[in-house]
Image: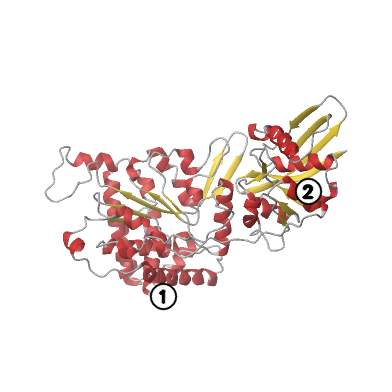
Amino acid sequence: MVQRVATVAFEGVEARAVDVQVQVSPGLPAFNLVGLADKAVTEAKERVRAALIASGLALPAKRITVNLAPADLPKEGSHYDLPIALGLMAAIGAFPPEALDGFTVVGELALDGRIAPVAGVLPAAIGANARGHGLICPAACGPEAAWASPDLAVLAPQSLIQLVNHFAGRQNLARPEPRLDGGAAALPDLSDVKGQETGKRALEIAAAGRHNLLLCGPPGSGKSMLAQRLPSILPSLAPAELLEVSMIASVAGTLQGGALTNRRPFRAPHHSASMAAMVGGGMRARPGEVSLAHNGVLFLDELPEFAPAVLDSLRQPLETGEAVIARANHRIAYPARFQLVAAMNPCRCGRAGEPGHTCRRGPRCAGDYQARLSGPFLDRIDLNLDVPAVSAIDLVRPGPAEASAVVAARVAEARHAQRERFLALDRPDLFTNAEASGPILEEIAAPDANGAALLADAARLMRLSARGYHRVLRVARTLADLAGAESVGRAHLAEALAYRASADRTTAAA
């Protein structure tokens, strides 16, 4: 007789159904595991053996065969331990086999019989709910699984013995409650920044329309300080966004204690990050920084220090909102709709353009440094801002500064106006101006007569590409939303074009 247990295999953030088939038959004692399993799965034999012994069960002196079907689907990870163990226990009569009917099982076993947390429980729970199954998972992952659906049956035992007692009626495992971590630590506040009023304005525009932003200035001017305060003015994740972000974090194993958070991700990788670390890949095609920053912010400090190939690999995710990892035997796509914020010095010494400073290498210092950034990459950045050094008067006698809560209220109002506009146009898939393109953009950002004349002259004189032209329109539409204006005017376009002037200078240097 073959005992079957349902589990899953992960392809990106999707959970594909896997059938664990356990057979105990007469023959020489052996424990064989088949079904295109990787090293972590094949090692499950020893963990299962030790966990059963610790739980008071001994493997029968028979031939044990475990098949993971479909056999042509690669099986990776340690979450197959628990379904293999439960299938084996049901096969030898430790509990009724029908107790596992209607359940999908994931979990790793410790040698003492405890059930350890695993990555990917939230996608597994969503997949189980779609198939009409309940979920058996580790206790530490129970709150995470409970988010999949209020109607999903979830069993989250701490050990094999607890689960057996539940099936035998000696113990009742309560359904875990979903837990939301709002973030105990306070975010850095904009009021901490002295001076840099233009930088704060650009940060507000970037937050309101989810525009990509590049800050260029000398060391110590406050570029990183500004970028680190962007999360404090961003709105909380919407329910659909929260689920998307949490599924990626679950697959990556970064959810803490099974609790979800409604704060937008803020990822700041070091400039030594490889291409696989940035866009995803590796042996298991794991999500990269662009996917972990989905619906949030990807901050790249010291931008020219990143490898040029790594930066150019961001061009496709910036356009499509998706990171595609293609291999010879499979193709995985992770969501990657992130907001790029970058900071850089004007040159390697950091003092190019500073009054009274003359570099020994001359203009070539700035030219060579900025040439590490390709024109097509820079063309995907909406806002380019030169950040000057903070003046002494701003440090000694700083003026009044707005708190993040005040700016966040304006950002939330502008985003609400954008959302209502897209819903009125029957485009519920769009949330911010940065996502608009084609006829939708031309409809929502059509300038008035004076604005159209200015834009036509600027497109000719600044030699704007089609992408650059549309990005100016998007920024102008966001400026109009922040001002509460119905249409895009000349003043909105003039300010939007001012943020492109720095881009043209950098592209010329490149």
Q: Residue at x 25, y 47 (%)?
A: 346
Judged by depth in the image, the label closer to the viewer, 1 or 2, is 2
Q: Identify residue type, mark 1.
A: Glu
Q: Residue at x 77, y 39 (%)?
A: 56
Q: In this rendering, does residue 88 appear at all? A: yes
- Left or right: where 178 falls relative to 45: left
Q: Is residue 50 above or below residue 443?
A: above
Which residue is labeled 1 in the image?
Answer: 486
Q: Identify residue type, mark 2.
A: Val
- Element under label 2? helix
From the top left corner, tell me how far across and down residue 277 is, in percent: 47, 40
- Left or right: where 341 falls relative to 61: left
Q: In this rendering, does residue 474 appear at all? A: no
Q: Is residue 299 above or below residue 28?
A: below
- Left or right: where 295 falls relative to 4: left
Which residue is labeled 2 in the image?
Answer: 164
